Image (tube, rainbow, N blue to C red):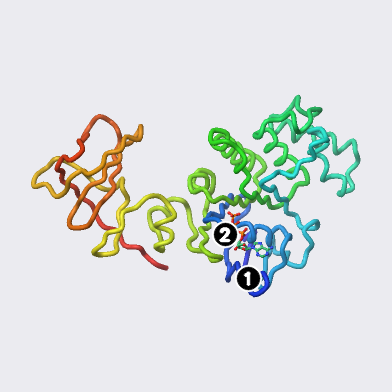
């Protein structure tokens, strides 16, 4: 495996914020660390980047133990939320900044900088100052500055959180494209499920300093391994009587008789319609159907619903 993290623990004083973290990663993979605020995502990334020491465990990159290597000597580049660009420097000087410490001649640095600008489709921007760029352009410059030193591993800490919704969507596609172009193993930290689903090959879902579940988006969505996974990923209805669950889009709703429920709320969402159905005693189920003109129901209409309860399969 390209990256192997074993038994990693991180304490701040008497508080353990990462407990027994174990995972591996393949070359060229894009892994997303997903979880709510405070679960330890950034701390884990900072441990891999070398900005925090480990309290226990090991991090191996391509067979080499990294935990005692200082951050600046690790073949790892990190892009932080705030990008950390130098506002008074030009785009090109920002991009080639990291080569100053790598015994690369000025001439070669400029050539490599221009190549990166081309790859990032930022040609023509080289003499601009950072303040003249949009958020998305700054993001690309920050990526370029990290990639120019040819790291083996790229770490991105909530890189899209300062951008507006539309730009977030286009930039995450761009990050994926750049990551594939450079074929670089990348860890992407986010608290946004949709973002992780859109970009990652695999997801590590974290809860309170522990890995709650690891897998592809499909695996985690279709087979949540804990109540936390179920609650954090997507919407679900938990059934009062059995503790089983059913996803809103997996419930079939028709006007077949005999009826077994009635609609108590109808919400138009554009491409879908969400119904809340009173079903059995004390049980309300949210049901999501495509807004395709078929099977549309009215508020208070009596309906027949059908579904297969799913069990949480703990591992
Ligand atoms: N330097 C520090 N000293 C003490 N406690 C810290 C330090 N850094 C982080 N923590 C604590 O570690 C826990 C995990 O924080 P971390 O920033 O890794 O979470 P996160 O999942 O990245 O959250 P967010 O999404 O809000 O950035 C939190 O309880 C935080 O208060």
Residue in the foreground of this view, choosing between 200 and 290: 290
Q: Position of residue 196 (x, y in %)?
A: 52, 48
**Can you tell me whether the CB of the residue at mark 1 lies under 8 Å from the nearest atom of ligand 1?**
no
Q: Quadrant of ligand 1?
A: bottom right
**The furthest residue to the left:** 258
Q: Mark number for residue 9?
A: 1
Against 48, residue 107 (above or below) is: above
Q: Mark number for residue 38?
A: 2
Q: Quadrant of residue 314?
A: bottom left
Against 57, residue 73 (above or below) is: above
* 84 with respect to 88 (left or right): left
**The furthest residue to the top:** 124
Tell me which numbered mark, 2 or 1, is placed earlier along the sequence.
Answer: 1
Quarter the N terminus occupies: bottom right
Q: Position of residue 88 (x, y in %)?
A: 83, 35
Q: Position of residue 221 (x, y in %)?
A: 41, 53
What residue is rendered at 42% in x and 68% in y? Answer: 315
**Can you tell me whether the CB of the residue at mark 2 lies under 8 Å from the nearest atom of ligand 1?**
yes
Q: Position of residue 7 (x, y in %)?
A: 61, 71
Residue in the foreground of this view, choosing between 112 and 7: 7
């Amino acid at each position: 495996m390209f990256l192997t993290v074993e038994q990693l623990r991180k304490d701040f004083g008497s508080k353990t914020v990462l407990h027994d973290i174990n995972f591996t990663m393949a070359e060229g993979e894009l892994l997303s660390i997903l979880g709510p605020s405070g679960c330890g995502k950034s701390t884990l990334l900072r441990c891999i980047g070398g900005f925090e020491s480990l309290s226990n465990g090991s991090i191996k990159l391509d067979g080499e133990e990294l935990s005692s290597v200082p951050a600046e000597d690790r073949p790892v580049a990190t892009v932080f939320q705030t990008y950390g660009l130098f506002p008074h420097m030009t785009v090109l000087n920002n991009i080639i900044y990291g080569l100053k410490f790598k015994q690369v001649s000025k001439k070669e640095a400029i050539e490599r900088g221009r190549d990166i600008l081309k790859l990032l489709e930022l040609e023509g921007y080289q003499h601009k100052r950072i303040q003249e760029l949009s958020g998305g352009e700054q993001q690309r410059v920050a990526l370029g500055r990290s990639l120019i030193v040819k790291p083996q591993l790229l770490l991105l800490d909530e890189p899209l959180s300062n951008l507006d919704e539309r730009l977030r969507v286009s930039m995450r596609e761009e990050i994926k494209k750049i990551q594939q172009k450079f074929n670089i193993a990348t860890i992407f930290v986010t608290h946004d499920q949709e973002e992780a689903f859109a970009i990652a090959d695999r997801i590590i879902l974290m809860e309170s300093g522990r890995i709650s579940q690891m897998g592809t988006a499909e695996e985690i969505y279709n087979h949540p391994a804990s109540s936390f996974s179920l609650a954090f990923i997507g919407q679900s209805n938990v059934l009062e009587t059995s503790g089983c669950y059913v996803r809103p889009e997996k419930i079939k709703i028709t006007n077949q008789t005999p009826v077994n429920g009635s609609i108590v709320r109808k919400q138009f969402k554009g491409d879908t319609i969400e119904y809340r159905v009173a079903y059995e005693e004390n049980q309300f189920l949210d049901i999501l159907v495509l807004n395709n003109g078929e099977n549309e129901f009215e508020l208070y209409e009596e309906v027949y619903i059908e579904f297969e309860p799913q069990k949480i399969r703990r591992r």
